[in-house]
Image: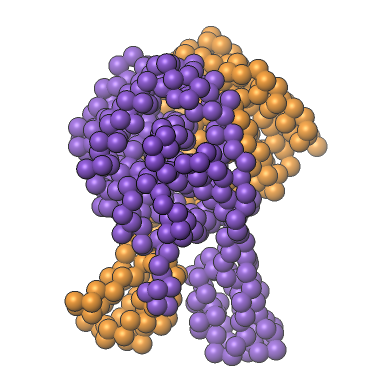
Chain colours: A purple, B orange
Amino acid sequence: MSIEDNKYSLINWKNINIPTIAITGGKGGTGKTTIAINLAFLFAQNNNVLLIDLDVDAPNTAILLNSKLKKIKDVINFLPKFIEDNCVSCGLCSKACREHAILNIKGKAPLLLPELCSGCGACKLVCKNNAIMDDKKIFGSIHIGKINENFDLLVGELKLREARSAEVIKATKSYALELIDKNKYDIIIIDTSPGAHCDVLRALYGIKNILCVTEPTPFGVHDLERIIKLIQHIKMAKNVKIILNRADLVKDGNKIIENISKKYFVEIISRIPIDIAILKSYSEGIPVVKKYPDSPSAKSILELYKKLEGIICQ
Amino acid sequence: MPIITILSGKGGVGKTTLAASLSVLFNENDNNNISIDTDVDAPNLLLIMKGKEIESRNTYSSEKAFLNVEKCNGCKLCYEHCKYDAIEWDNDTNIPKIDRLLCEGCGICEIVCPEKAIEIRPVKSGVIKYLETEYGFPAISGELEIGEGSSGKIVSEAKQFGSEIANKRNKDIIIVDGPPGIGCPVISSASGSNYIILISEPTPAAIHDVSRALNIAKYFCNSIGLVINKSDLNDKFRMELEEFAKENNIDFLGSIPLDKMVPNSITKGIPIIKYAPDSPASQAIKEIFKNLKKKLILMKNA
């Protein structure tokens, strides 16, 4: 594999020159997608924006933007196909498979458990008898939508009953690099899934600006701490900020988030109040900053947007 | 031993709130349950009830590549074969640099290395704890190491640990507080369940995600019920969810109204059913508990 082949691989996100902002947060349902679509909408007023939805298990950006998506391609991976005539039941493939997806059967071709196969290709590499051919397996799909002239949406979606979300995230990010090569984007915004696991790691990989959306509850605190640890572990982000959503949800709730902010030296950049307008706009499929620009939540998000403009232009 | 698993697709719609209160209700009524938090990436069940730790087990379900620099001859084969971008080539020293974050432990580098300079070894991927809760029932909580990927395996181990404790303690109902999404840990959580509760809220995004979760639930389980949380958020979408239950022929277990007491109870670290037993949300959860018990009895008699 030459360097040229790798031009669009995940690792190249490290070298991207366009400002990138990822929205994450640990806990589910704190408002990641709401913030992502609103920021993308605001940036798109003066810039070409690409919003990438990497919550491939539960992608909701298109719903919140009331947008139709067009499927671009499937996310395909290698699956071994055994040629019984060539197989000598040596057992090497079964031994090489660390996912235990191949069962060796004496005198017969091995039995494949496709749901366990990660598509790594170790089996084919060790087979000395040309008994393994390429088959393929679809893990998910990649979709694109146009919100307005300046605003493109790219969505990765995990196929139902498939487990490997990370593969879909990597493929979507690779395809995004192709798009970025072709189109002139000024800003890239990424929406991630909840959690602080390998999927989120891959979504955040190489991203310079990361916003962690949380809420002022012990759940919010616990999961925020995990995601900040992940970001500090990746060591690639220049700016990491906390967005405290539903800031007035409970009395004295801000204090527990402020403690995390101090402990990890991560600033709380925005506090968004509970607001019926945000709920309404959410169900209507229109960003709150567009539909209810005078609402308290829209004003907070606008203020956040202005701060971010300053940060990413540095 | 019925295993009741709570899933949602979308995060933050109330899985843990429901799981905690149902656990308390089962315990008060029959004293026969154990609870397992399989949201190993954001385990929150034990944040709303105190527990005394009885046992803790480390899990080593992830594997990573390790390089023995002295044996490396700089042939670059590992770098050329890695499918996961996990090996960078350091031109100054002419040795590979393994990115532990991106390495998936597939073992291809170990296979191609002519000098046997690379070895795949298990690494700690998480910890599973067995606690005795303040309400008198045992709970199991798995927590994944940050950034790790083997969440399905740690979910299986947590469930295995839970079954052992259930046997030892003579508990015959297992309540599983599941993870969001539909991927690896969700599939592991759903597998082997006897009843799956899907919880959603009346918004388009939550409906979209719960319908994806239903697909997983149906694949693994014949008995499924729906709970609508924050049901008075939007009438049109609430009706859409009720219709969704009918169309898909799943039980409708009940609705929980928006209730300010719920976030307050979370802040205090107390299940809503204990914090404010007379609140609208608690009343609704009691109703859901009754409906669920009826379904379980029907299943038992079937």
Q: Answer whether residue A41 is visible to the viewer in this image.
A: yes
User: Residue A302: which quarter of the image?
Assistant: top left
User: Quadrant where the N terminus of chain A lies?
Assistant: bottom left
Residue A211, x across and y down, in percent: 34, 38
Q: Quadrant of residue A258?
A: top left
**Does residue A296 lie above or below A88 as drawn?**
above
The C terminus of chain A - image quarter: top left
Q: As displayed, is residue A17 above or below residue A298?
A: below
Residue B66, horizontal then vertical, whole percent:
31, 71
- From this view, report whether residue B212 is shown above or below residue A302: below
Q: Horizontally, is B114 left or right of B171 in the view?
A: left
Picture mark count:
0
Q: Nearer the viewer, residue B122 or B10?
A: B10
Residue B99, percent from left and from top: 32, 64
Q: Residue at x 54, y 16 (%)?
A: B258
In the picture, measured across the screen, residue B149 lies left or right of residue A135, that is: left
Q: Measuring 62% from the left and 41% from the top, which residue is drawn there?
A: A68
A155 sits to left or right of A43: right
Q: Is residue B172 visible?
A: no
Residue lying furthest top: B278
Name the residue rendered at 40%, 67% in the picture: A7
Q: Nearer the viewer, residue B56 or A300?
A: A300
Where residue B279 sits in the image (x, y, percent)? 53, 10
Residue at point 56%, 45% (across, down): A145
Front position in the image: A202 or B225: A202
Residue furthest out toward the right: B302
**Residue nearest the viewer, comparing B211 with B217:** B211
